[in-house]
Image (tube, rainbow, N blue to C red):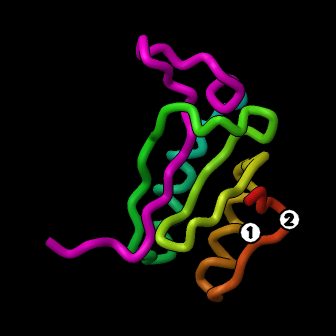
Amino acid sequence: MKKPTYHILVCNSFRMAGAPQGVCHTKGSGGLMQTLEEEILDRGLDAIVTSTGCLKVCDRGPAMVIYPQNLWYGNVTTDAITDILDALENGEVCAKYLIA
């Protein structure tokens, strides 16, 4: 099995009971996943996107993490996704949205 170059985790605020409750979900993180998938395909990036439970950075949601770089981004919007992926393609960090 070929492993992807990037693994993008998107917080969807799922809790143990399975119901999405937190900030990321209520701010539309589910829709961000669709945007990410489309951008990844359009750019030909070797990446996969995964929905996660709460990433515990609710005050900065919606949040996403890019591995293996371990880049944590917050207040992610559809516009932010463009900036973040542009930086990723250039081997850079998008400081504007970086939280960790």
- What percent of the width, then of the height, locates residue 14? 50, 24
* Mark seen at residue 83: 1
Q: Are marks 1 and 2 in contact (CB under 8 Å)?
A: yes
- Observer-nearest residue: 100 or 51? 100
Could you tell me which residue is drawn at 63 percent across and 65 percent down? 71
**Crowding at label 2, few (<14), some or many (≥20) Cα neighbours within 10 Å?**
few
On the question of residue 41 being in view, the answer is no
Tell me if residue 94 comes above or below residue 33 in the rendering. below
Which tag, 1 or 2, sits closer to the chain's start? 1
Residue with the most extreme right position: 96
Q: Where is residue 70, by image quadrant?
A: bottom right
Disc 1 secondary structure class: helix
* Mark seen at residue 96: 2
Could you tell me which residue is drawn at 49 percent across and 58 percent down? 8
Q: Which residues are magenta?
A: 1-26
Q: Amino acid at mark 2?
A: Lys
Disc 2 secondary structure class: loop
How far apart, in angstroms, are the residues tagged by discs 1 and 2?
9 Å
